Amino acid sequence: MITETLTPHPYAACYPLVSGTLEESLYESIKVNGLRQPIVLWRDEARDKTWLIDGRNRYRALCQIYGGVSDEQVIWRDYESDEAVRLAVLDYNENRRQMSTAQKSVVAGRIIEARAQLFTELNTLSVESSSDSVESKVEAEQIQEGVDHSDEAPFNTEESTRESDGSSNHDQPSSIVSVPKKAECPPEIRREVASTLGIGPKTAQRGAAVVSRKVPKLVDALEEGLVSIEAAYTLTQLDDDELEAVITQGKEVMREKARELKGAEKVAKEEKKQNAILGDIEVDKLVVSWTEKQGTESQSYTLEIEDPKQLSTLLMTLTKLGLRGKTDTEAENTEAENTEAENTEAENTEAQNAVTESTEEA
């Protein structure tokens, strides 16, 4: 009997445990039929740890019914890396769960988050291992030289550097190691995870943003269907205190706040779009004149617009349509060109008439 507590691998823990009727059915099935599908375990030598890869619900039921798991109820798998585990976990759970799109987005977010943490953890272990090797090497060299520095400060610390004679230590290996930054999940992995779960990359990205916000109540609200994926993603803009207050007030308040934020975001995008088109243009007043004809009668109208928002919207529309008109300078030039053209035409006509009169007299 395996009595030690088995820890689910971070990828396996990305999926929600069954509850309610499904959980009761699983317990009854195990009691009546025994365990039909073994629990999958993996011995992770790099971390010196045993992971539960598949069968968290079955494991929980067996512990509650029998107090543990027997050797016959587990199967050991050998995985080359965490990436191999990720693919296996996705495969184990691909057709097993009837999850909503919102729940799948959360799973995708947890997988993406877990992947970054696992890679960072392995990099840290690798660095620490290298550091231990360096310190062991230095200690061995000191023993060979017959020098005992066990009571002195650690090798190459800030204090020992200050007390040195100022000479460079570049030829000596350093045991001061910086912890690697958190590894980001590549876009191709995000797309693969989304595809395997049957959701779009954008949905997976939204789920990852909600999960990385580190607010369990928001994740729960999304999984329970209290808010949509888009609404939950929008609410991540709030600070901790406001987000907590909004969630506490229930789904209607969450949805209303998300709509409010979305509206503000839409207005901001529209303003940005207008600025891209109009630049820093400021308009004080816009006068529009037109004539309407009905049969032999006509009526002229003039409209003056001074409201800043209306001016901006109308000016942007006119710009898109290429109907901004002409500046005063352009209008003066055009008028001058028209006048010159009219004068030239008149002169040409006068000259033509003179030629015609001369010909007739002849």
Image (tube, grey):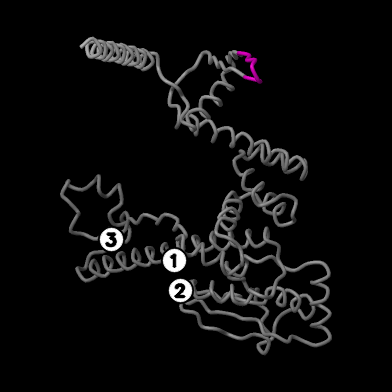
Q: Nearest the camera: 226 or 152?
A: 226
Closest to the observer, 101 or 25: 101
Residue occupied by mark 2: 46
Instruction: Determine the residue positioned at 67% across, 85% down.
Output: 38
Crowdedness near tag 2: few (<14), some (14–19) or many (≥20) residues, C-alpha within 10 Å: few
Above or below, comparing residue 253 to residue 116 in the picture = above
Write down the residue under mark 1.
Answer: 122
Q: Position of residue 47 (x, y in %)?
A: 48, 71
Determine the CA span between mark 1 and mark 3: 32 Å
SS at circle 3: loop
Q: How far from the left and from the top, in percent, is residue 20? A: 82, 67
Residue 72 horizontal side relative to residue 161, left or right:
right
Residue sitting nearer the eye, 350 or 151: 350
Residue 236 found in image quarter: top right
| Residue type of the residue flagged with mark 1 | Leu
Check disc 3 and report the residue beneath it: 149
Three-letter code for the amino acid on which mark 3 is drawn: His
Determine whether the residue tagged by mark 1 lies in a helix, strand or loop.
helix
Q: Are marks 1 and 2 in contact (CB under 8 Å)?
A: yes
- Specify the segment rendered in magenta: 293-300
Which mark lies nearer to you, 1 or 3?
A: 1
Which residue appears farthest toward the bottom when viewing the image? 72
Alpha carbons under labels 1 and 2: distance apart: 8 Å
- The quadrant of the picture occupied by the C terminus is top left
Along the polypeptide, which appears first: circle 1 or circle 2? Answer: 2
**Residue furthest toward the front?**
362
